[in-house]
Image (tube, helix red, strand yellow):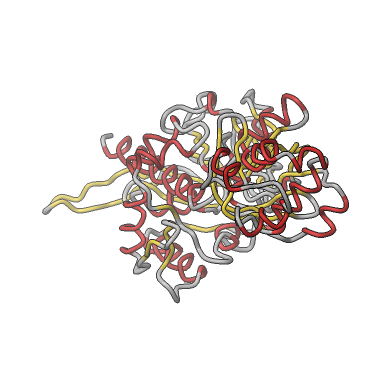
Amino acid sequence: MVSSLSKFRNNTVTFEVMKKTVTIIGGGPSAMLLAANLDPKLFDVTIIEKNNALGRKFLVAGKGGFNLTHSENLAQFIPRYTPFEFLEKGLTAFSNAHLRTWFSSLDIPTFVGSSKRIYPEEGIKPIEVLNAILNRLKQNKVALKTKENWIGFNAKNGLIFDSGLSAQSDITVFSLGGGSWKKTGSSGDWLNHFSEKGINIIPFQASNCASEINWKKNFIDKNEGKPLKNISISCENSSKKGEIVITKFGLEGGAIYALSPAIRNGLNKEGEAIIIIDLKPSLTVNEIVSKLSSGKLTQQLGKVIKLEKPKIDLLKHYLNREDFLNINLLANAIKNFPLAVIGSAPLDEAISTVGGIDLNEIDENFELQKMKNSYAIGEMLDYDTPTGGYLLQSCFSMGVLVANHLNDKYEKK
């Protein structure tokens, strides 16, 4: 893959421009948005993907409702990431609003759901969204090579593949994904290829995943699969209101996923993380005390405090009898119920991962500082993101930022 000539006409004069070749390794959302936004007059673009087709993990994200992004304003949106500073430029240049406009240009209208998440309009299937993007790639004459597994670099930093294919291009962009959902090809087995080039990599860890709790047997036998609704959970300096589900493994659900960075920090430092559950956020300790009276406290918790049975069971199984019968101690437990998280779900069961290429290895345009004209984008970078469309949006934004950067850089030459 080398630079090629392209002709275009300005009034009566024909100009010949040396087009740059761009090779993109990986066919996920960041790769597709990058290729869709590169100027075909300036670049010959090839996407090389290990699967039979592009967008495998993209389609998995569409199961149960295709949450493309979130509708909140950028001032709230950007700080959701950990860290967020490296994404600020990209999210500003290609925001959630820009994404909706872009999909509209592909005839994929979107709407804001009751959760403020953004989805394709009802009736539009995930495969239709993917096909609309692929049609844009076709219009831009993007070449696709599938069933090609990248296995590292040759002595000249050229790309080599297990089929025997090799590639040398003017610009290389890596969009290799994280370490979750191996069945989609996102295995994270590329880490050592960069480490061998002196690029610092961080081992993958699970994020947005179940937290492991060592439940008491009597409690889990009665409550496995039941939700804890309308609660607030905190860990370290983070807190989240919402709902979680009790499982044999521990806890699952949006409220616990949102605390992934804090929980992971505790696990890494201490071997466990303490979460505090507020079982009744709408009442203060004093209000709970005032509503309770001596007598049948179990009945009062249900009828007066309006706690569901799993919450009452949690209190009864984890408080000793003396503390349960002490109204002040019981009220404090309702507002500040501690549980020890002893582990996280395996990588392949996580919604996303952290780890990958150290953010210090890239510049503001995602170019690898130790490999000129090579870029890294998407979940292969070491950052954390909550559920709710934030991961996809960050990948889309990174792809567009690199496309805009390259368009500007080579249009001026």
Find residue 325 and report its horizontal and vertical position in percent: 76, 43
Please name the residue shown 87% across and 53% down the image.
Answer: 218
Please name the residue shown 80% across and 54% down the image.
Answer: 248
Find residue 131 and report its horizontal and vertical position in percent: 47, 68
In this view of the protein, which residue sits in the foreground, 302 or 126?
Answer: 302
User: Left or right: 1 with respect to 195?
Assistant: left
User: Left or right: 1 with respect to 252?
Assistant: left
Q: Which residue is situated farthest in the right direction here?
A: 217
Residue 251 shows in this picture? yes
Please name the residue shown 60% across and 32% down the image.
Answer: 357
Please name the residue shown 66% across and 35% down the image.
Answer: 263
In this view of the protein, which residue sits in the foreground, 119 or 409?
Answer: 119
In this view of the protein, which residue sits in the foreground, 288 or 142?
Answer: 288
Find residue 8 and report its horizontal and vertical position in percent: 24, 53
370 lies above or below 296: above
242 lies above or below 225: above
**Quarter of the figure with residue 272:** top right
**Quarter of the figure with residue 152:** top right
Q: Which residue is situated farthest in the bottom direction here?
A: 123
Quarter of the image with the C terminus is top left
